[in-house]
Image (tube, grey):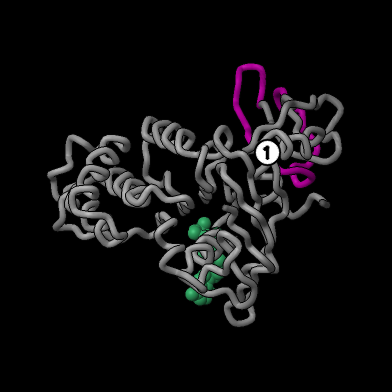
Amino acid sequence: MDLILKKITKAYGKQTVLDDISHVFSNGIYGLLGANGAGKSTLLNIICGVIKPTSGNVYFDEKIIDSNLQFYYSNLGFLPQIFNYYPQFTGLEFLVYIGMLKGLSKKAAKDKGISLLSLVGLNNVEHKRINSYSGGMKQRLGIAQSLINDPKILILDEPTVGLDPEERVRFRNVISSLSNNKIIILSTHIVSDVEYIADEILILKDGKFKEKGTAENLLSTIKNSVWEFTQKGKTSIQSLSNFTLVNKKNTPEGIIFRVISNKKPNEQAKKVDPTLEDLYLYYFSNERLSR
Ligand SMILES: Nc1ncnc2c1ncn2[C@@H]1O[C@H](COP(=O)(O)OP(=O)(O)OP(=O)(O)O)[C@@H](O)[C@H]1O
Ligand SMILES: [Mg+2]
């Protein structure tokens, strides 16, 4: 059962945030990468039926989602960017509540809630009130609630915000293990969140998917554009305005620059293998390069 976007446009007044986007999502993990304000949340909210597009439609199982929202919601899990919870509930009570709202029996919701709390590493605090949870713990509870109905479509808007590195790794492993029979779309601006787990990365810019493909495909598009060179002592280098600076590192041998440039920036520069972080900067931090 595919999830299909057909010619989705969203405008707020004169600002067109999404501009005629079409895409087919099959089972797998999709990483939606975009800068602040690129329109990631707008798109995910449209996919979840929370906001209406100005034009275009979302289809699931070949039907417009609005034609049977109840069926659609029984197949959907959603972690919004701003996640509301009931602070007086314990983690487990909250999951039972959400599970019952989604049509599970109390017993089924409790069983599922307990296993999900363990999946996200909150089993030791399941009977503590949510207002005593840290930010990262609340975020993990948000991830757990999105999975309560074992959804076919899982939409996660910046799910790793507030997670420490260990929890980030746990999150990636959990998501990977779920991806066989689900469509998982997650938005982020942290490239390492999607580098290893996304089957397809979608780069949202200027209202469109500027690029789409595997991490490998996307990296190959900039394989001739990432350079490193060392500036020794006071020797001046070519003006920095000709390229995007990725990194500048002081070492005893001099300052090592890592830059993105469509042309070799200077005589001693050496081409290096690109990373997804370079790719992100290529798209989002530099208007000078002609693309
Ligand atoms: N209800 C609204 N009314 C008017 N403009 C809006 C509304 N919601 C979003 N926008 C605008 O639409 C654009 C896209 O916003 P959106 O929240 O989708 O971006 P985002 O990619 O999720 O950003 P972030 O990374 O900061 O979460 C922004 O310019 C935002 O100001
Ligand atoms: Mg957002």
Question: The magenta stretch spans which residues?
Answer: 231-255
Where on the picture, by quarter, is residue 124?
top left
Point out residue 214 in the picture as x, y percentages from the top left corner: 68, 38
Where on the picture, by quarter, is residue 250?
top right
Point out residue 290 in the picture as x, y percentages from the top left corner: 83, 52
Where 220 sits versus 98, above or below? Answer: above
Where 127 sits versus 53, above or below? Answer: above
Residue for badge 1: 214
In the foreground, 219 or 231: 219
Q: Is residue 88 left or right of residue 40?
A: left
Where 161 sits versus 225, above or below? Answer: below
Task: Confirm whether the magenta stretch covers residue 256.
Answer: no
Q: Is residue 129 left or right of residue 112?
A: left
Point out residue 103 in the picture as x, y percentages from the top left corner: 29, 59
- How many labels were placed on the picture? 1
Where 162 sits versus 70, above or below? Answer: above
Residue for point 64% across, 76% down: 55
In the foreground, 277 or 188: 188
Residue farthest bottom in this picture:
13
Q: Is residue 169 visible?
A: yes
Where on the picture, by quarter, is residue 89?
bottom left
**Helix, strand or loop at disc 1?**
loop
Residue farthest top in this picture:
252
Task: Confirm whether the magenta stretch covers residue 233.
Answer: yes
Residue for point 66% across, 36% down: 215
Residue for point 41% across, 35% down: 174
Q: Residues within 10 Å of mark 1 (few under 14, many from 20)?
A: some
